[in-house]
Amino acid sequence: MIIYKIKPNNPYLLTTNQKQSLMESNAITLFPKKPARDPKATGRQLKMFSNYFQIDFDQKEIKGVNKYTCKFEPEIPDNAKDMRKNVLRAVRDKVKEKLEFFIDWGTCVYSLRKCADLPVYEAEHEGAKFKVTIEWVQEVEPTDRDHLVFLKIFFNSMMRGLKFETIGPKSFNSAKAHSLAAHNIKVWPGFDARILMKERGALLNVDVAFKVVRTDSVLNYISELREKAERARGGGDWKEAIEAALVGATVVTR
């Protein structure tokens, strides 16, 4: 960006070339010029820090994420997501005996253990009997989309296990809330964590986040807004005040 400082001369009496010359001669640059660099210079190393963290497994025996395909007999339609989950839930404990921890996503199952000889499981749902066949497909590469899917689901399930409140992409620890009783609010500490896929694999990006939560109910808040509007000089529009305060707000239920 360049800011031009024009001298007191009347610019309208100058020619176009004179105006341009005058403006260029009085130009003030906000940013310093890029220093000239010797083409033979080798540069120097810089140590930099970032809030992106590489995700690695802490156990050497874990080679990566294993992908399995899950088949049902009779076949379950693709749009019957709840039915598919319920049938798989019926055999979850038996599958855990072989795969330990696993995550199901659509018609796929992901686990950190490789097992090529899983038996055919039998399940019952709403009076119907199903056969569930889980077959090993491949070990997922660290840069594959399936690897990213596994990490995101695993991270979200871990947050739920730690009793964090998830609002959008952010997680908050309501048990460590800071109370401000005079203002009827609590401040939940938390973080905004996102898992991104880069050239060398998945990276975890973490930023600190806070959530301000009112301790009173929505009904009490509406009553308070109405009273303030009615006490205002000339009587305010309490409906407009309530809409301005609540539209777009997040309501936490327990």
Image (cartoon, rainbow, N blue to C red):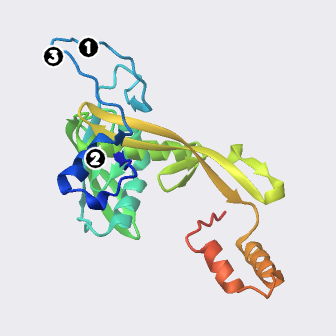
Q: Mark 2 belongs to which amino acid?
A: Leu
Callout 1 secondary element: loop
In the displayed structure image, the side of residue 244 where residue 135 appears, left or right: left
Crowd around label 3: few <14 · some 14–19 · many ≥20 (10 Å): few
Residue in front for this viewpoint, 70 or 90: 70
Front residue of 159/242: it is 242
Q: Which mark is residue 246?
A: none
Residue 10, compared with residue 242, is above or below; it is above
Rendered image quadrant of residue 33: top left
Q: Which numbered mark, 1 or 3, is in the foreground of this view? A: 3
Residue 39, disc: 3
Q: Position of residue 106 (x, y in %)?
A: 30, 56
In which image quadrant can residue 42 be found? top left
Residue 20, horizontal then vertical, whole percent: 23, 50
Q: Which residue is mark 2?
A: 22
In this rendering, would 21 be left or right of 62? left
Residue at left offset 23%, top offset 65%: 75
Q: Upstream in the sequence, badge 3 or badge 2?
A: 2
Circle 3 SS class = loop
